């Protein structure tokens, strides 16, 4: 097991009616509140009004329009507004895009430079940030309980993720599964698959070491997504299933389940980020396309771990199979699951318009230095993986 230090200060208010605690919680955070949200879903489903009611004693600075896969220009605009209005706190109400943006605005507002510096320079962490908090409306990223953020620069086709350090942990997260009832089937499935991809990055790391606690938790998270997502697709306001998906997403990326494991270079996330930078696709949908070819590639290198996945997650009978054959059987089961929940399996479904795209995606990732040689994966491997799902 790798050495680790566990720290997560975010107060998690989970469950039905938890928004009612917002009013009292806000007492600690000053008067001027930047209320950040996305393209308008919260106005249509009534969450906006409910939040405003809780903020009744505050001076609310409303800032909507954060797009899915938030862009640098939008963040610059939000940060400028946050400074002008002298906000004391940033409250992000939405999915991963809004919650990530809330963290970047909170850090960018008190930083004497451009927000892209945090993304462009690997070692540059925000040293401080305004207090930030979230109300979750879409499940998958776990952004509500972690310190990460992701930003896209469409001009350069770069989408970069960052662990923002201690300053970027939300103070609290309001997580009411009922608020996700209105998320449509495609976005729901996309978020759920994002959860699986987050677990994968740790589950398959340190594959030769015996870590029954981490493996057991991670297998449970993936199994939960596999059983609960179909229940939600069948019945979108199924409280229990929505709650299980929400908790799975948080467990996948808030620290506990992956302690003591590395996560390599998060290659599949980088393979996806270039897709959402280029095609503006849903993050989890992009992952659904690139995870299987990446895992097929890795199965050759660590077949034993992939057998474990097939047997413990999908409960497949692999007795007469080699480790590699068993691993591939597990990946095939995953592909069947992806197909069954309506997620895409090809680049074309995300917007790729010709074989040149494959070339572009592989070369751009290498050019941006996003996937380094240390992984054993270079231009040729990337091209082969993308081509296999064109
Ligand atoms: O913008 P609105 O109108 O609110 O609509 C959103 C958006 O169109 C809609 N939505 C959200 N809540 C809804 C709803 N529609 C109906 N009812 C509701 N209750 O859903 C759409 C997608 O929302 P978005 O926030 O973009 O999705 P997601 O939560 O998947 O976040 C994606 C972003 O998070 C980053 C991704 O790269 C991407 O930029 N990630 C952040 C991570 C983190 N902080 O740890 C890790 C992830 O790996 C990921 O990279
Ligand atoms: Zn993700």
Image: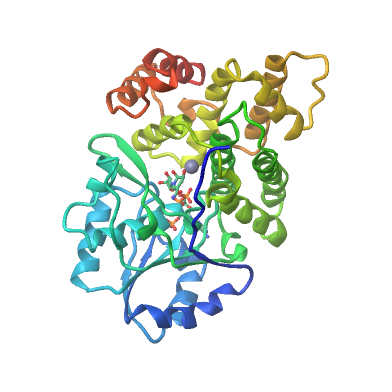
Q: Nearer the viewer, residue 255 or 233?
A: 255
- Left or right, 68 with respect to 235, comes to left
34, 25: nearer the viewer: 25
Figure coloring: rainbow
Coordinates of residue 382 in the picture (x, y in percent): 42, 19
Tell me where residue 373 appears, x and y as whole percent. Answer: 37, 19
At 16% from the left and 54% from the top, the residue drawn is 113
Give the farthest residue toward the front.
Answer: 3
Residue at (40% x, 49% y) in the render = 68
- Asked if one can make out residue 332 in the rendered structure from this viewpoint, the answer is no
Which residue is found at the position 55% from the left and 38% from the top? Answer: 261
Q: Quadrant of residue 176?
A: bottom right
Residue at 40%, 36% in the rendered image = 273
Measured as percent of width and height from the top left, residue 49 is found at: 46, 76
Taking the image as shown, residue 155 lies to the left or right of residue 217, namely left
Position in image of residue 308 (x %, y %): 71, 28
Quadrant occupied by the N terminus: top right
- Give the residue at the far bottom of this rendering: 57
Q: Is residue 183 visible?
A: yes
Quadrant of the rendered image containing residue 101: bottom left
Total of numbered circles in the picture?
0
Left or right: where 190 falls relative to 80: right
């Amino acid at each position: 097991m790798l050495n680790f230090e566990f720290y997560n200060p975010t107060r998690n208010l989970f469950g039905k009616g938890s928004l009612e605690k917002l009013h009292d919680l806000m007492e600690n955070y000053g008067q001027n509140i930047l209320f950040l949200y996305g393209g308008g879903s919260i106005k249509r489903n009534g969450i906006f009004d409910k939040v405003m009611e809780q903020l009744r004693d505050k001076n609310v600075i409303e800032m909507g329009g954060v797009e899915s896969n938030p862009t640098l220009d939008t963040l610059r605009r939000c940060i400028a507004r946050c400074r002008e209005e002298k906000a004391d706190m940033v409250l992000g109400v939405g999915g991963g895009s809004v919650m990530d943006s809330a963290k970047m605005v909170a850090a960018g507002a008190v930083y004497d430079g451009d927000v892209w510096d945090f993304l462009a320079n690997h070692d540059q962490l925000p040293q401080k940030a305004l207090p930030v908090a979230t109300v979750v409306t879409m499940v998958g990223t776990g952004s509500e309980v972690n310190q990460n953020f992701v930003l896209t620069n469409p001009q350069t086709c770069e989408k970069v993720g960052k662990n923002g350090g201690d300053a970027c942990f939300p103070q609290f997260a309001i997580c009411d599964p009922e608020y996700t009832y209105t998320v449509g089937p495609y976005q729901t499935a996309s978020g759920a698959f994002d959860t699986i991809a987050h677990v994968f990055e740790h589950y398959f790391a340190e594959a030769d070491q015996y870590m029954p606690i981490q493996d057991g938790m991670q297998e449970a998270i993936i199994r939960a997504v596999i059983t609960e997502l179909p229940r939600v697709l069948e019945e979108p306001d199924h409280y229990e299933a929505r709650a299980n998906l929400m908790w799975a997403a948080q467990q996948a990326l808030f620290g506990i389940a992956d302690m003591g494991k590395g996560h390599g270079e998060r290659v599949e996330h980088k393979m996806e980020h270039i897709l959402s930078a280029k095609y503006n696709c849903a993050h989890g949908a992009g992952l659904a396309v690139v995870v299987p070819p990446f895992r097929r590639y890795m199965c050759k290198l660590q077949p034993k771990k992939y057998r474990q996945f097939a047997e413990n997650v999908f409960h497949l009978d692999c007795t007469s199979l080699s480790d590699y054959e068993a691993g591939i059987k597990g990946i095939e089961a995953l592909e069947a699951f992806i197909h069954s929940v309506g997620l895409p399996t090809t680049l074309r479904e995300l917007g790729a318009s010709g074989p040149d795209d494959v070339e572009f995606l592989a070369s751009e990732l290498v050019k941006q230095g996003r996937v380094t040689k240390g992984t054993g994966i270079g231009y040729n491997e990337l091209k082969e993986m993308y081509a296999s799902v064109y």
